[in-house]
């Protein structure tokens, strides 16, 4: 079992930066692939960024490449999402998630989810 708690969301202006954090409980955090997903009102939950258990490999949705950076600190049981050059279309609830299976970044593969943190970007 893994419990996830996100923090760091807020209201910012276009062009600003935010850093989201996701703190995980459990001693096996380093065994999980971690992902960030976002869900805007009326839309499906979408993949944003993912990181391998070791942190060596990272993956991004095309819409955030070059602007967002995912990282993890296994000693602190925490995964981060640095978001730069934010745009109004980045507005959504951001969730972190963990999975110990598969290799896909589909939300259906992820077994553990945080409650989410709201990010609102004004123009």
Image: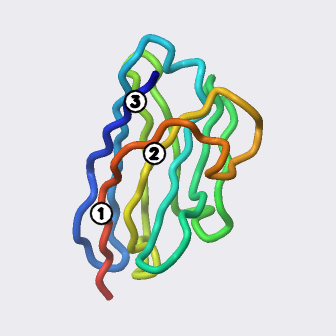
The quarter of the image holding the C terminus is bottom left
For the residue carrying disc 3, how many other residues have a C-alpha within 10 Å: few (<14), some (14-19), or many (20+)? many
Q: What distance separates the C-alpha of mark 2 from that of mark 1?
A: 12 Å
Which element is circle 1 on? Answer: strand
* Furthest residue toward right: 103
Query: Residue 54: x, y in percent?
Result: 63, 23
Asked whether the residues under the numbered discs 2 and 1 touch, taking CB atoms below 8 Å apart as contact, a structural biologist would say no
Q: Nearer the viewer, residue 76 or 24?
A: 24
For the point 37% across and 35% down, which residue is it?
Answer: 4
* 4 lies left or right of 97: left
- The residue to which callout 1 is attached is 118
Specify the quadrant of the image occupied by residue 24: top left
For the residue carrying disc 2, how many other residues have a C-alpha within 10 Å: few (<14), some (14-19), or many (20+)? many
Query: Residue 80: x, y in percent?
Result: 42, 41
Q: Counting residues from the N terminus, which is met first, the one under dot 2 or under dot 3?
A: 3
* Tag in front: 3 or 1: 1
* 63 lies left or right of 25: right
For the point 57% across and 65% down, which residue is it?
Answer: 64
Marker disc for residue 35: none
Query: Residue 121: x, y in percent?
Result: 32, 76
- The residue to which callout 2 is attached is 96
- The residue to which callout 3 is attached is 78
């Amino acid at each position: 079992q893994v419990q996830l708690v996100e923090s760091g969301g807020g209201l910012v202006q276009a062009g600003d930066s935010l850093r989201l954090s996701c703190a995980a409980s459990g001693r096996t955090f380093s065994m999980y692939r971690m992902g960030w997903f976002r869900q805007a009102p009326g839309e499906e939950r979408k993949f944003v960024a993912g990181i391998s258990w070791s942190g060596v490999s990272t993956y991004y949705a095309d819409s955030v490449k070059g602007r967002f950076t995912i990282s993890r600190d296994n000693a602190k049981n925490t995964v981060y999402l640095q978001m730069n050059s934010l745009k109004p279309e980045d507005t959504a609830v951001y969730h972190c998630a963990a999975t110990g299976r598969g290799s896909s970044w589909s939300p259906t593969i992820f077994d553990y989810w945080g409650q989410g943190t709201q990010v609102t970007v004004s123009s």
